[in-house]
Image (cartoon, coloured by chain):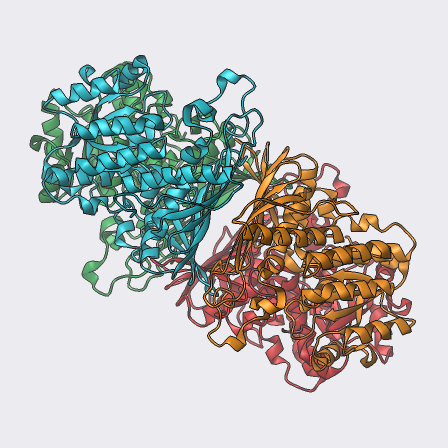
Chain colours: A cyan, B orange, C red, D green
Amino acid sequence: MNMTSDASITRLGRQLRLGFVGGGLDSVIGNAHLIALRTDGMAQLVAGAFSINPEISRETGRSLLLDESRIYPTWREMLFGEQQRDDRIDAVVVITPPALHGEISSAFLEAGFHVLCEKPMTATAEQAESLHTDVGKSGLVFAVAHCYTGYPMVREARELVAAGAIGEVRMVEAEHAAGGPDMVREPADKSKRHWRFRESSMGKASVLGEVGSHPHNIAEYVSGRRVASVSAALRTLAAEREVYDNAYLTVEYEGGAVGRIWSSYVAAGSEHGLRFRIFGDEGSLQWRQEDPEYLWMLRPGEPAERISRGMARTSAASRAATRIAAGHPEGYLMAFANIYRDFLSAIVLHNLGEDPSPALRMLPTADDGRSTMELISSAVASHERSGAWTPLRLDWAGGRG
Amino acid sequence: MNMTSDASITRLGRQLRLGFVGGGLDSVIGNAHLIALRTDGMAQLVAGAFSINPEISRETGRSLLLDESRIYPTWREMLFGEQQRDDRIDAVVVITPPALHGEISSAFLEAGFHVLCEKPMTATAEQAESLHTDVGKSGLVFAVAHCYTGYPMVREARELVAAGAIGEVRMVEAEHAAGGPDMVREPADKSKRHWRFRESSMGKASVLGEVGSHPHNIAEYVSGRRVASVSAALRTLAAEREVYDNAYLTVEYEGGAVGRIWSSYVAAGSEHGLRFRIFGDEGSLQWRQEDPEYLWMLRPGEPAERISRGMARTSAASRAATRIAAGHPEGYLMAFANIYRDFLSAIVLHNLGEDPSPALRMLPTADDGRSTMELISSAVASHERSGAWTPLRLDWAGGRG
Amino acid sequence: MNMTSDASITRLGRQLRLGFVGGGLDSVIGNAHLIALRTDGMAQLVAGAFSINPEISRETGRSLLLDESRIYPTWREMLFGEQQRDDRIDAVVVITPPALHGEISSAFLEAGFHVLCEKPMTATAEQAESLHTDVGKSGLVFAVAHCYTGYPMVREARELVAAGAIGEVRMVEAEHAAGGPDMVREPADKSKRHWRFRESSMGKASVLGEVGSHPHNIAEYVSGRRVASVSAALRTLAAEREVYDNAYLTVEYEGGAVGRIWSSYVAAGSEHGLRFRIFGDEGSLQWRQEDPEYLWMLRPGEPAERISRGMARTSAASRAATRIAAGHPEGYLMAFANIYRDFLSAIVLHNLGEDPSPALRMLPTADDGRSTMELISSAVASHERSGAWTPLRLDWAGGRG
Amino acid sequence: MNMTSDASITRLGRQLRLGFVGGGLDSVIGNAHLIALRTDGMAQLVAGAFSINPEISRETGRSLLLDESRIYPTWREMLFGEQQRDDRIDAVVVITPPALHGEISSAFLEAGFHVLCEKPMTATAEQAESLHTDVGKSGLVFAVAHCYTGYPMVREARELVAAGAIGEVRMVEAEHAAGGPDMVREPADKSKRHWRFRESSMGKASVLGEVGSHPHNIAEYVSGRRVASVSAALRTLAAEREVYDNAYLTVEYEGGAVGRIWSSYVAAGSEHGLRFRIFGDEGSLQWRQEDPEYLWMLRPGEPAERISRGMARTSAASRAATRIAAGHPEGYLMAFANIYRDFLSAIVLHNLGEDPSPALRMLPTADDGRSTMELISSAVASHERSGAWTPLRLDWAGGRG
């Protein structure tokens, strides 16, 4: 058995200590972070500024039985407070709205804390560039919590593509088309509108960051290629909505493959809607987040193969991301836990003075986060030019990788 | 039991007589036409010019036990020969390469024969306009054999959308992404290249007519809306291929709905690949040609409904297109047989001096065929303008609709 | 293209002539027979005694545009009448209730007509033995219309098992668990009870013949093994029903494999319900009639393989039973048409003075039909002995094959 | 958000303390227990006797960073040691081979510790009766860790059946047919045989406890009915195996419903294989462990409904067992975590002096565990009597519930 209290933790002799900024009782995603953090016993949550509302922050911290002195009303007080402690946190998890990601992440990195940052990495391409620079300077462990890349079969797809299993990549189809009851329509009462659908929070193209960042990230993750150019059609389809709620992107990848990225809030009846299909000249792979245990490999004229998570023939990378035998679905939270396990393993290696890069190999990076923000910027430009093809900036100092 | 020898045939007192142009032993689709024609016992194939090669035409006719005098070396001889006979054919089925569809159809219509024409209706928008005019003048029964519209659950989707079951239509996703062993790659031996992949046969954008006509037609058929504008990205992805083999179209419908139409020969591993999803503001419908017995209806927050062909609650139009009880898959050939049944029923009604329109209600028309050719024309124009949105001609004398 | 007007028909130079006993407008299955008969253009229906009600027989014949002189009020008159004609029928299809199958089939065989007989072959084991003997004496073509054995992927499964693809067979799970609205409950009005649910028509265990004959036949067909012994539990689960409506059989095959056969009318919500799974020591195969294009092959620790009808790698036997390319579902009626094609091909070969056995290779035989009737007899005996294991008679003169 | 650090824990003001007997690094199931335990932050593992091998026990405890004084070489030393401590464990989890379950559970109960016991509850019906009595006497919290009953959609099925959604229950089909590479065949090297396949460990019918306990438990759990009588056929299908590896049980429930329970190690190619279908007179429900997010409800003549975990319309009981929104698969480990959450919640309520029964409502009990052991005993008796129907003992002092 692979006792998931990672062996490296045994070598370190203690659990890591984490703090949350955001993720309070009023947050949608906080609980997923908590479960992911706990899964392998590698870390404990010991501090937090859980909400912009100090009451909620306090209530959250108490419900988690935290030490009162480590329940902070603001992230700045948390940053200051933790710096004073001997048992200070090892790392911070940034779970705030995107507009704050950049500033908070940079501040904690500068103070020497490792950072796990929610997606999209920032709210603008400029913020992304700035944070990307700060990550590079810090020498610390930084990752973007693109949770779906934690799925073993997404990692398997990446490994198969890299190994040439489908030949040369030609097309990548990715979509995250959501359509729950709270999305397909604006409430009659304007005061009940979700911040996600207000232009003031995230800009008119927020669908591209909130939803579209996932299919873009997963398409690049699996294909191993960066989007180079985009033709975009953005629409507002729900009456009285302020922002775009449906985005069709046609993209070209470096090297010539093409693809499409669809993000939507109005795919009525869709429960989640993230999926990809990647086509090479010898075959294709398909995966859906709602059926995540299986990766389908299709080859012309051959029986379709349904590859199960955990099979002996799967790659070391995907097997390392599993905890139980095939046939026992692991699901979303274990995928999320893989993001944590990799992130925490990298910190342990860092703390032991060893090279953290093996642990980082499958994790979304600041490069990835910046790439998404660039895509959004170019997509908006394309849309405003009648869908004309618009290149992404490829001339970053650090290159694109 | 619904004895499928249609009641109208009993009233007429004889089977209808059909002739084929094309569809010989060297044809891919001829056999499907034959089985569809035979299914309900409403007609007999009695004449044919089955191939551009007179030897193949003769061999085909003999294998079908036809009267030697009605096995013709060319379609012109068939047109002439049948006109001389008392027992002349009622109708002709045009199964040639698309470049000949217009000329042959117009000639038979002019001579008073009803016409069932394979898709795409013609090879160019100009030919389509011309044939459309001839159909209008003829007063005869004409239909385009878009066989997938014969599927009961495609018809059910059309009826549900028309009845408002998913609310106001917002998005239509349609694709026909094929990728068989003979498509994903050009043979090393140039002489073995399929005519489909030669620019000389069908033009560089032939993928749009050969494959793309289906998802375009089905999207319009189900949504009840015409495409008004298109942004296109055409690519040649197989090395050494002369023509485009992958086409991404983003489209806007009259009235404001949007959608995408993907046609491909290089979706490696796909066996067929025709499917659609249509989203309204209250729910959505999904259908796949490879699993055609079921139509999925999804509503936000509700259990997904899998509606089976033949259920009592389905529409009269879809029930009329079934032959056996739910649970016994009917498949592609029975869908094709529905095209024949509707076409033949219309002719019977015409011959009995009655209004054929009830029989024509679910059949693809010359309007539909022309609409596809217009889309192709505008898509090529858009592609050549960096994907800029390009309107379709909406000012036809006869209107669109 | 494989022009399905079978080449042998071209050699014979005419279509075969068929007559129906039963299958009239009031019949459930008649229309399926008609479509199957027409599919390949090998035969014409020219005569019939379509119903025990002469009015319905006449109405049926006229709706089919038959010659009035060949629409018969009774099967005996049809037998007599056809014997007088030069253009007499080649074969008869027996589509009556099971209690008449034996007598009619034997009479037509004796008069020199080939016979296709609906399932179950007879109503009792004694009748089955008698008809089996008559078939043997006749030297004519006889088959039981177990339509599901016409599915290409059922034939593929049989060939794979015979070729050792799953190793030595250990278990065979087969079921036909139906549960439509008209089955799960008796109508309040006793006069509306279906004959299927009256003890007087088919005996108390009629569920075993009407429904159970299919999973039993398919299990023996695919496994290549005969059931040797049975332990049965029969139940009447719908209130006020006279006959058993749920039958659980546990069986042992010759050679030691075991399995279960479930037949039911009360599997509420099931649309059809025929499926099998067969397990060997190296893998297993699964197939469902409601999703018939695919055969699943599972091997321990390997990706599941979904084998599609029509793939190049499938057996000659299954490819010969297909009419169109993979990706275009063929469905139930084409499976049924395969029964007709094989039956008619055998007659053509017989008429040409050649060996019909190649055409008969995949068809259910009188041996198969008798085997089912023996199973039923032993199952009832087991049930009445508290489920004790009860052998089937294995000592037939002709052996069991 | 439902912060899963249960509110009751906040009221208690501390995490609960748990100890493991078994579940060490050499155990298959230990890690699933660990993750389940950690998920909601309600408890900490603080002590353990993790293996019969003291070295493995020590290594396991250290890998978990436990206090050395609480890593015990034997369960008796753990029982003694913990009784001495002020910070003694609240409860023990028994993860040993089944033959030890009864003795260990009874000893810990007697010492005042709550107990979560792995399945099957014991190795024999006699042990089950004895433990059942001890549970009754103790007044403490006891549950059997039938992990699959933790799935929200299994609980939904139970609630739907209880609410009459499918009418009166008629048939229950349950199976756990496994067939992994390590199961379908005995290794040539006898020393490598798994203890599961040795008669000395678990008796010849061990397949019924190891595998069969799950479908039996889930059938009773969902149907709300106890098996009253059984007809069994047990087989050894893998060559050279000592024990039965395939068990077919036909059962009758109290009140007259019937069903089948299939347990197997030799369903070659099956990855897990637990599933159930339950049929009432108005509809049916279907669920598969390998696709656990969905419960299918089928009604005659109606569209099939696929009910998703987490939907608003699902029962309070199933919604209480979910942690994230529909569309994000939760999988096996979260089902397991529900067993822990219910068990721990009951202890918190007990510790707070409140009634624990609301927390226990969905948990498998000592009654359930005993029922399985009775089934096994009667099944073996039936098998030895040629499959004759054999009643289960229904005359327990405490009745059957």
Residue C210 x, y percent position in the rendering: 64, 56
Residue C358 is situated, as x and y percent measured from the top left of the image, at: 60, 79
In the rendered view, tell whether residue A6 sits above or below residue C324.
above
- Name which quarter of the figure residue B351 lies in: bottom right
Residue B327 in sight from this viewpoint: no
Q: Residue furthest left?
A: D69
Where residue C161 sits: x, y (%)?
46, 68
Q: Residue at x 66, y 86 (%)?
A: C354
Identify which residue, D193 or C376, lies in the foreground.
D193
Q: Nearer the viewer, residue D30 or C221?
A: D30
Where, quadrant-wise, is the C terminus of chain B in this rendering? Answer: top right
* Along the line of sight, the residue nearer the viewer: C280 or D43: D43
Q: Is C390 placed left or right of C377 in the picture?
A: left
The residue sitting at 23% across, 41% down in the picture is: A342
D6 above or below C369? above
Q: Quadrant of residue A343?
A: top left
- Name, please, the residue furthest toward the bottom: C353
Residue A288 location, x and y as percent?
43, 45
Closest to the observer, C322 or B219: B219
For the image, the number of numbered tags is 0
Q: Is residue C299 visible?
A: yes
